[in-house]
Image: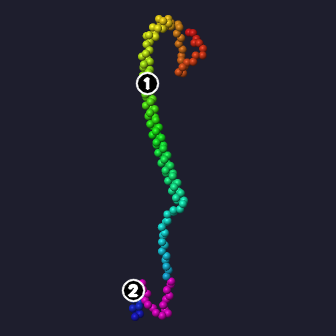
Amino acid sequence: MARQETENRYNNRYYAPYVGGSAVPERAPERRVKKRTRSKAEPRTGIGTAIAAMLLFVAVFSMVALFLGASSEMTKLQKTIETKELELSELKAKNEAAEIRLNKSIDLDEIYKVATTELGMVYPSDDQVIYYNRSDGGYVRQYEDIPEG
């Protein structure tokens, strides 16, 4: 029987053989391992989060409104520029037409005839013509008489 107990002790490692009487060893108290349960992160739903969300919404809405306003203003200005360019081209065409009419209405031969016959004007002789160098300006301001040659 001793042999059987020994075999049972070694073959059955998980179950200790029965030993009666005072020779029973005392068992150490079992340790209970507490399983840690991870609590899920609870979403923050405080008033600070609500205010931050509201501020974000207001900021995004303001940016969109500013963008749409600027885009509308740019479109309006482009249309105004196109209108002004069209008006400018029409005015240039009218100006050119008026200049052509004016040049056609002037008859240089008629002017010469009136100047020589009615007014008694004659071409100047070579000793009456004085040449001078013109400055870079677009006009000449005369402060005193032009000296004779």
Residue bearing mark 2: 11
Name the residue located 46 percent from the left edge and 10 percent from the top edge.
Answer: 111
Which element is circle 1 on?
Answer: helix
Position of residue 79 relative to residue 95, above or below, is below
Mark 1 nearby-residue class (10 Å; few <14, some 14–19, many ≥20): few
> Which residue is nearer to you in this view: 146 or 82?
82
Residue in front for this viewpoint, 148 or 86: 86
Of the two numbered discs 1 and 2 on the same chain, state the one appearing first in sequence.
Answer: 2
Quadrant occupied by the N terminus: bottom left
Amino acid on which the number 2 mark rests in the picture? Asn
Q: Which mark is residue 146?
A: none
Q: Is 13 contained in the magenta span? A: no
Residue at image point 48% right, 47% down: 65
Q: In the rendered view of the protein, which quadrant contains the C terminus?
A: top right
* Percent position of residue 57, x then y: 50, 53
Q: Answer yes or no: is residue 37 visible.
A: yes
Q: Main secondary structure of the magenta part?
A: loop
Considering only vertical position in the picture, is 38 above or below 28?
A: above
Segment tinted magenta in the rendering? 14-29
Look at discs 1 and 2 and give the one toward the viewer.
1
Which residue sits at x=42%, y=88%? 9
Looking at the rendered structure, the kind of residue marked 1 is Lys
Q: Is residue 112 above or below residue 51?
A: above
Label 1 to label 2, Cα distance in Å? 121 Å
Q: Which residue is mark 1?
A: 94
